[in-house]
Image (cartoon, rainbow, N blue to C red):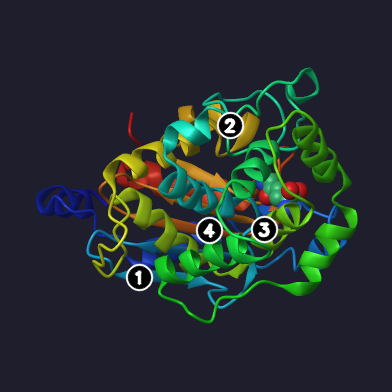
Amino acid sequence: TYAQQTIEKTTNKTSISTKVLNEILEKNRALYKDGKVADYIPELGKMNAKAIAFSVVDENGKIINVGDVSQKFTIQSISKIISLMIAVNEKGEKNIFDKIGYFGTDKPFNYFANLDNSGKPLNPMMNAGAILTTSLIDGEGEIPFQKILEMVRFITKNPSIDYNKSVYNSEKDTGNRNRGMFYVMKNTGLIDGDEEKLNNYFKQCSIEITAEDLAKIGYFFAHHCTRFDGDKTYQNPELAKLIQAQMMVAGMYEFSGEYARTVGLPSKSGVGGGISVSVPGKIGIGTFSPSLDSHGNSLAGYHMILDLVNRYKLGLF
Ligand code: DON
């Protein structure tokens, strides 16, 4: 490994191999036993707890995949960075953040925050702020959701991506806490419109992707919103800075502080078992393992990221 480290240093670019990714995956494979697959959305509870995948888009835009790479799962809260991107592009940062804070959190993702005192959601990464963000995207009916779906397809260059209708229906049937937040924000005037706006949030959470798609999303924000193949249609350094800052302070919810201490990279998790990581100016990482810790973050995913970051010194600090 000394020789390997020397090579890594002399080339300046981080050369990540399939072999290393496989080693890290195997080391963490059994961790699913220590967590729990999300079942508060009944349809999510059907996922195979043992599935695991690890993907990297390297500095040259090259994709490296190991594990159950074709396994699809729902994007869940990782969609919140995409909806934030679209809302800010349409309305401008000020108009969005007049209604939502830039705060971190010591509370879980479904925390009501100060909503009941006519306050603003803490940030766009937790459910309340994300529901509000999606409601601010222009368009009637399903159009805001379609914009989110199209953006995920664009970033991943994967036009076959769609949403999982069973998961969507399951979210909608059981999402009364989210519905409660929606109506409290309607009551205080933060949200304008009917429940179709909330359904767009449920639909965006139900978009099905793979670990590779998450690595491409991570790469996109790590590179000023440039796609892994170099397409600069949405290039916007300021927007990438905003999204990554939000991922850093709240992307892993109440675990974000400890995560910043150990991994030190902007990351976003979802209860479907995915994590998308941006190594600014460098690579994108996507992980999948549906067994979650008590904060709703993928357990094996976190440990695979931690091992990769330690091995290649990818953390910012
Ligand atoms: O709002 C919900 O409950 C889900 N559709 C998304 C939550 C989520 O992914 C939280 N993440 N860890």
Crowd tier of the residue under label 4, counting other residues whose Cα lies within 10 Å: few below 14, some 14–19, many 20 or above: many
Left or right of 183? Residue 67 is left
Instruction: Decide which of 22, 125 is in the foreground and name it.
Output: 125
Instruction: Name which residue type carries label 1.
Output: Ile
- Does residue 274 sit above or below 240 in this rendering? below
Position of 94 with respect to 241 (left or right) is right
Label 3 close to label 2 by CB (< 8 Å): no
Residue 11 occupies which quadrant of the picture?
Answer: bottom left
Viewer-proximal residue, 246 or 263? 246
Residue denoted by label 3: 205
Q: Would you name the residue on which mark 2 appears?
A: 123
Is label 1's Cβ within 8 Å of ligand 1?
no
Task: Choose mark 3 or mark 1, whichever is in front.
Answer: 3
Q: Secondary structure at mark 2?
A: loop
Whole-angstrom CA distance, mark 4 to mark 3, is 17 Å
Q: Is residue 283 left or right of residue 95?
A: left
Q: Nearer the viewer, residue 265 or 97?
A: 97
